[in-house]
Amino acid sequence: MVALYVLVLAACTEENRAPQVRTELTASSPSPADPYSHSPSRFGVVHLHAGFNPDPRVVEGTAHGEIPARSIHRRCRGWIAEVPDYVLAADTAFLRLHVLGRSREDVSLVVRKPDGSVVCNDDRNGMRDPMVRSDFPIGSAQIWVGVPSQGATALYRVGFSEVEWRSSAVPLPDSY
């Protein structure tokens, strides 16, 4: 009986516990100085639900041309950062959500929806400001703002809206 008790105690010690394997999916191994190393995006998460206010919801950032946008989808143009600029966290599904990019520079949009499908836009209907208009299921979507060439940068603002609106609803970012 004592031998059985010792065996049970030995089985519960840390030394005999199976090792835990931790896996992480990252675009690249961040350097220790990388401020986004523990973030799913470079600039944060945009939380939205049906009927959100204010509409449009506007965020801003700086686009960086690090990798070809075609690495996300073959039809996407330009260059994007390795890590998404923003993550859109949708608490409810959207039948039609507009995502509009605004910049004084030429920019493009790359959006990977929660179901894995990708939507890209560079120059919408001959206009310089890219826009993606699509349904979005519940979940997290990745948003990249791209630039035309590798190494280029551009200040931008991105607006999210449930209603049809004009580019002027999202103000241009300040200059460098």
Image (cartoon, helix red, strand yellow):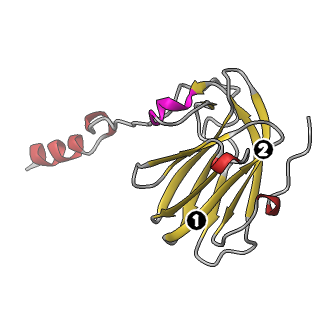
Q: Viewer-proximal residue, 163 or 140?
A: 163
| In this view, 67 is above or below 154 | above
Disc with the residue nearer the chain's start (2 vs 1): 1
Q: How far apart are marks 2 and 1 (CA)?
A: 19 Å
Pointer 2: residues within 10 angstroms few (<14), some, or many (20+)? Answer: many
173 part of magenta stretch: no
Label 1 element class: strand
Q: Describe residue 23's horizontal placement relative to residue 92 as left or right.
A: left
Residue situated in front as seen by the camera: 137 or 44:
137
- Can residue 153 be seen here? The reply is yes
- Above or below for 72 versus 1: above
Mark 2 secondary-structure assignment: strand
Q: In this view, does 159 lie to the left or right of 17?
A: right
Q: What stretch is highlighted in magenta?
A: 68-74
> Which residue ends up furthest to the top in the rendered image?
151
Residue visible at 72% across and 75% down? 53
The residue to which callout 2 is attached is 156
Which residue is drawn at the image coordinates 47% and 53% (left, top)?
113
The type of residue carrying mark 1 is Leu
Quadrant where the C terminus is found in the figure = top right
Task: Characterize the local packing of mark 1: few (<14), some (14-19) or many (20 or more) Cα atoms within 10 angstroms.
Answer: some
Q: Which residue occupies the foreground of this view, 44 or 150?
A: 150
* Residue located beneath label 1 in the image: 97
